[in-house]
Image (cartoon, coloured by chain):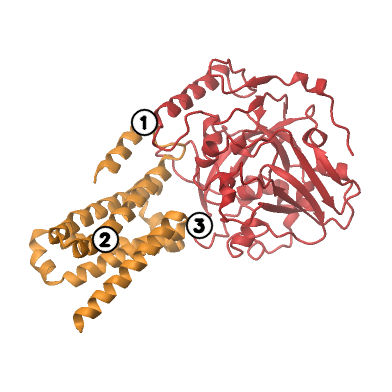
Amino acid sequence: MLESIDESDKMHLLVMKINETKIKIPSSEITSESAYLNRRKLIQSVGLFSLGLGLAESTFGQNQEIRLLKSMRNENYSTKETPNSFPDITTYNNFYEFGMQKSDPYMNSEMFEPKPWSVEVSGEANLTGTFDLEDLIDFNKLEERIYRLRCVEAWSMVIPWVGIPLFSILKKFEPFSSAKYISFETVYRPNEMPGQKRRILSWPYKEGLTIQEAMHPLALMAVGIYGKELLNQNGAPMRLVIPWKYGFKSIKSINKIHFQERQPRTSWNISAPKEYGFYANVNPLVDHPRWSQSRERRIGTGFFGAKQPTMPFNGYAEEVADLYSGLDLRKYY
Amino acid sequence: MLVPYFLLIFRSLGYLSGLGVNPVETIIHETGLWSIRFLMLTLLITPIAYYSGIGSIAKLGKPVGLMAFFYVLNHFLSYAMIDQAGDIGVIVVDIIETPYLIVGWGGFLCLLGVASVSFKRLENWFNQNRSTISGLVYGATILGVWHFYWQAKVVELESLIYSIILTGLILWRLRISTNRKQ
């Protein structure tokens, strides 16, 4: 088993209570302090006027202690596009464990307790067992990566994630050559995740990748956004970010990792196999059976922002197209 | 009946917490939802008048139905003019490519037919063809609920409820008309 990092090692990580309104929010790497405070004011006023209209009073909806995270921007893997605002990223989410409306995760996730967190690792690997979050993530080696995110519903965002490459976690477990696939599971806690009380999907949420995809340097295990720990609605405390695939592949609040020889079943594929394949690579040429995937609405472009064309592999074709050479992308959608 | 509409206008002006992170989607979803709700209400008026014994309630059918058409029109226009930026070529391709849009368009055409005979000039025709009118409203509602059900990734509770009520209404209607024929 890996050694847990010492409590004192975490001292550099500033702890603050986000629900204290008077607190000064320190600047993150890419947002100026004033811009960030303005956003905060904006969402506070949203909270004040939203009674009865279905938005929560508290901006962040939870009493989480949100730590700031130290990270280095990885320019090679970051887009130059302007990131979406913090309110955009934290109030418009698909996370059916907390409800099906976009504002539900932000409104209904305050019960969720992401600390402490442990992950069960099993299957075709030398090192298996239960690991604490701090065993898996080296908080001294965090990177910031600004990725595009394309939802299967034809909207998109640009998000400054903080995390570490997935391969750097996975190789610690020394997977066997028989480990052709990796499956991931979201935690199942119906008392903290009200959406899990209805069987709208096969709970716990399951996702999977081929080992080649998981080992690709673009695949990220994220623990933060905008220099702060992930909020519950974004998949605290750790989630995948696979930027060339539709958003539902980037599974949130992961507590199980399993190395296996056979392709895993995934929740959306179980729910509607003809609509959501195992690969789910962003592809403007392969439509969803019920809607077109050729264009997308970039969140934050406002009322008259035109839709923009969707790029193959969400603009990461240069990096990842090789993974799929010879694969019929219409058949393996 | 216009309260939801004015609320939406206030919200688009930035009041009442605004339209949220994806304003275009909010407008389209809200106008769509209220279209379905008013269509359901239109169809419920006849059985309510029938069982309550207050026949004058039936007169509400026309204004409520027109209100439904008003929301449908706003729903369609916000899709066409805002979401698709008014590009007719793009709209046609989008509707053809998207099955639930074909269904929604069909519902819109049904209501367009009903609304056009609501003008005075056509009122006589309207009075002589009540069953055609109510058939078109039923058609529009069925297509509308189908469109609503079909655009979601998973079955939404609200569309499920409307489907059940609608099925009940159709069965009731069929029973009434067979009774009349006997």
Q: Secondary structure at mark 3?
A: loop
Callout 1–callout 3 Cβ contact below 8 Å: no
Q: Earlier in the sequence, mark 1 or mark 2?
A: 1
Residue A24: name its quadrant. top right
Q: Is residue B49 left or right of residue B170?
A: left
- The single residue placed furthest to the right in the displayed view is A126
Residue A262: name its quadrant. bottom right
Q: Which residue is mark 2?
A: B44
Q: Residues within 10 Å of mark 2 (few under 14, many from 20)?
A: some
Callout 1–callout 2 Cβ contact below 8 Å: no
Q: Secondary structure at mark 2?
A: helix
Give the amino acid at mark 1. Answer: Gly
Q: From the viewer's perspective, is residue A68 above or below residue A301?
A: above
Query: Which of the chains is orange?
Result: B
Front position in the image: B42 or A91: B42
Give percent across and percent down for residue A250: 66, 46
Q: Is residue A92 left or right of residue A221?
A: left
Residue at mark 3: chain: A
- The single residue placed furthest to the front in the displayed view is B52
Report the mark closest to the observer, 1 or 3: 1
The residue located at (25%, 55%) in the rendering is B69
Give percent across and percent down for residue B96: 42, 63
Q: From the viewer's perspective, is residue B102 above or below residue A80?
A: below
Q: Which residue is mark 3?
A: A292
Q: Which mark is residue A190?
A: none
